[in-house]
Every structure is written in C-alpha cells, then in structure tokens.
C-alpha cells in the first residue's frame, strides 16, 4: 500500500520495496511524491486518481467537515487511501478496475500505451497477475 517515499527515494534498491521482494508485488500508489514513493516498483502498480494527492475526500474542506481538529488526517489522508482502497477491493472485487496497461508512467503520461494489449484487471486483492 502506497510505499513510503520520504527518505527512501535516494536509498539503494536493496533497502526499499521492489518486485524482487516477493513472488508478486502489487502496489497501490495514492500519494506519490509526498508521503508515497513516486516510481513504479512492483510487478503491477496502480495509480488511482493519478496516484497523487489529494485523493477523493482528502481536501482540507472535506477533512475539516468530518473532524475540525483533524490536522493529522489531512496530512496523511491521501497516503492512507491506499489501504482503504485495498479494503474496499476485498468486499467488492470490481470496485476499482484498471483499464490502461502501460509499460511505465512516462508512457502513460505521453499517451503512448499499446491499446491492443490493454485489459481490465481489478485493483487490490483480486488483481490479475
């Protein structure tokens, strides 16, 4: 879930999460570049809502509406969305469908993904390896 970014971006590969750490590494990036790691590092990486803050429900107005004293929640709301998305995927396997298959984030941003190889795969527990 949204691997830690601060302090880890400059560490050697051997000291941070990557695809060599398990048979299948499934990543959900929700706060890339702030609290989360900004690069593709798993066998499959999902970037809901472009993987950046603020995630839905995480802008200051929405957080203050839930809890006027929630400064900590506001600071980490987008980072915490990754485990909330994963939990929702356990209950509803088709809640989040990834529809664009790209080799990397740069290709996605340049819109040069091979659309013939695209398939739909659920994000979370039921991802198709």
Image (spheres, rainbow, N blue to C red):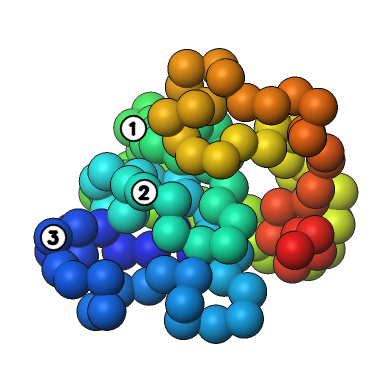
Task: State the CA–CA distance, disc 3 to disc 2.
Answer: 12 Å
- Dot 3 or dot 1, earlier in sequence: 3
Task: State the CA–CA distance, disc 2 to disc 1.
Answer: 26 Å
- Left or right relative to 86: residue 3: left
- Dot 2 or dot 1, earlier in sequence: 2
Disc 1, SS? helix
| 60 lies above or below 79 | above
Crowding near the residue tagged with mark 1, few <14, some 14–19, many ≥20 C-alpha atoms within 10 Å: some
Of residue 101 and residue 66, the one placed in the foreground of this image is 101
Residue in the image at 60% along x and 56% along y: 44
| Image quarter (top left, top right, bottom left or bottom right) of the C terminus | bottom right
Disc 2, SS? loop
Q: Quadrant of residue 113?
A: top right
**Name of the residue lying farthest toward the top:** 111
Where does label 2 land, which residue?
39
Where does label 3 land, which residue?
10
């Amino acid at each position: 879930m949204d691997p830690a970014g601060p302090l880890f971006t400059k560490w050697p590969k051997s000291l941070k999460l990557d695809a060599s750490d398990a048979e299948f590494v499934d990543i959900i990036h929700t706060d890339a570049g702030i609290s989360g790691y900004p690069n593709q590092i798993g066998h499959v990486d999902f970037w809901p809502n472009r993987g950046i803050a603020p995630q839905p429900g995480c802008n200051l107005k929405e957080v203050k509406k839930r809890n006027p004293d929630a400064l900590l929640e506001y600071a980490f709301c987008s980072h915490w969305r990754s485990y909330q998305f994963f939990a929702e995927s356990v209950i509803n396997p088709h809640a989040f469908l990834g529809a664009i298959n790209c080799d990397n984030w740069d290709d996605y941003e340049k819109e040069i993904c091979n659309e013939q190889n695209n398939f739909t795969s659920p994000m979370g527990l039921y991802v198709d390896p």
